[in-house]
Image (tube, helix red, strand yellow):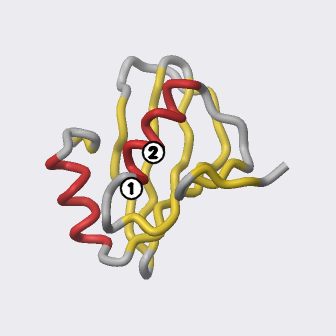
Amino acid sequence: MKFRTNKVKHEHSTTNDMKSLFAAVSQSPFATSVLPGQIKRKHGTESGLFYQYTQGGTVKLLAKGTGLVQEVFVVASDPEKLLADLRELGLLRER
């Protein structure tokens, strides 16, 4: 079942930690839509939101938690300003 809460589209399952992270990303004035992708298992201790790449007006991020990683696609009115805003809010982590 597909539906939206504010700017966040719910198509794939998410954990409660990720839901709050996606809601925080959606609060950016430069985020038009937040589209969570598939969840995959991961190894390692890294957690948080990490930048992957920008393609057109869409920014791909990885949301990493304990034992999982989830792709997040954010449609942005201005991708560079979105990334700067996420860094300023302390949501985006650097590798």
Question: In the rendered view, does 2 fall on the left or right side of 68?
Answer: right
Q: Which mark is residue 72?
A: none
Q: Is residue 88 above or below residue 59?
A: above
Task: Provide the residue designation for mark 2.
Answer: 62
Front-lying residue, 80 or 53: 80
* View extreme (front): residue: 6
Q: Is residue 76 above or below residue 38?
A: below
Task: Provide the residue designation for mark 1.
Answer: 52
- Could you tell me if residue 95 is visible in this image? no
* View extreme (right): residue: 1
Circles 2 and 1: CB distance less than 8 Å? yes
Q: Secondary structure at mark 2?
A: strand
Question: In the rendered view, does 27 fall on the left or right side of 73?
Answer: left
Q: Quadrant of the C terminus?
A: top left
Which residue appears at 21% of the width and 42% of the height? 94
- Could you tell me if residue 19 is visible in this image? yes
Which residue appears at 39% of the width and 64% of the height? 31
Which residue appears at 64% of the width and 34% of the height? 14
Estimate the x, y position of residue 66 in percent, counting from the top left.
49, 18
- Badge 1 density bin: few <14, some 14–19, many ≥20, Cα 10 Å: few
Estimate the x, y position of residue 28 in percent, counting from the top left.
32, 57
Question: In the rendered view, does 62 fall on the left or right side of 39?
Answer: left
Which amino acid, mark 2? Leu
Front-lying residue, 43 or 49: 49
